[in-house]
């Protein structure tokens, strides 16, 4: 998934974003995308939310190739009202 530059977005992440006031996949039509500014401990990044033409929900982090390795997990959280991402090895 790291080499494809886009991954399937699990329902738990979609729920977290919607429940915390971030852009929702429910608001995106097929073929549309939006971005959220987020923060890793290593710095800011853009999180892209995308709905494919056939309706699949996808997500990507613009610095993922530099920060993540195969088998890592990304933990979503809030700091104030900002999206905070943590890499879990």
Image (spheres, rainbow, N blue to C red):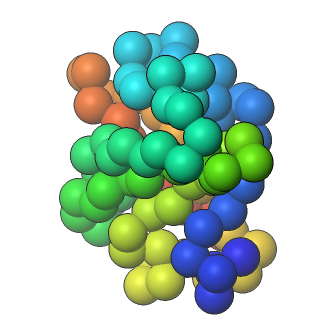
Q: Position of residue 49 (x, y in %)?
A: 49, 46
Q: Quadrant of the N terminus?
A: bottom right
Regarding residue 17, the answer to whether it shows in the image is no
Q: Residue at x 50, y 31 (%)?
A: 28
Total count of labels? 0
Observer-nearest of 29 and 39: 29
Judged left or right of residue 42, residue 28 is: right
Q: Position of residue 76 (x, y in %)?
A: 53, 39
Q: Residue at x 29, y 60 (%)?
A: 45
Q: Residue at x 56, y 76 (%)?
A: 5
Q: Position of residue 6 (x, y in %)?
A: 60, 68
Q: Is residue 84 above or below residue 88?
A: above
Q: Is residue 47 above or below residue 69?
A: above
Q: Quadrant of the C terminus?
A: bottom right
Observer-nearest of 80 and 51: 51
Regarding residue 12, the answer to whether it shows in the image is yes
Q: Residue at x 43, y 53 (%)?
A: 48
Q: Position of residue 51 (x, y in %)?
A: 60, 45
Instruction: Tell me the quarter of the picture where residue 82 sits.
Output: top left
Observer-nearest of 80 and 21: 21
């Amino acid at each position: 998934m790291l080499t494809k530059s886009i991954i399937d977005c699990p329902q738990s992440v979609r729920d977290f974003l919607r429940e915390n006031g971030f852009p929702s996949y429910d608001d995106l039509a097929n073929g549309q995308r939006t971005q959220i500014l987020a923060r890793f401990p290593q710095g800011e990044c853009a999180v892209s939310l995308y709905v494919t033409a056939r309706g699949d929900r996808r997500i990507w982090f613009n610095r993922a190739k530099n920060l993540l390795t195969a088998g890592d997990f990304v933990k979503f959280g809030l700091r104030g009202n900002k999206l905070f991402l943590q890499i879990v090895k």
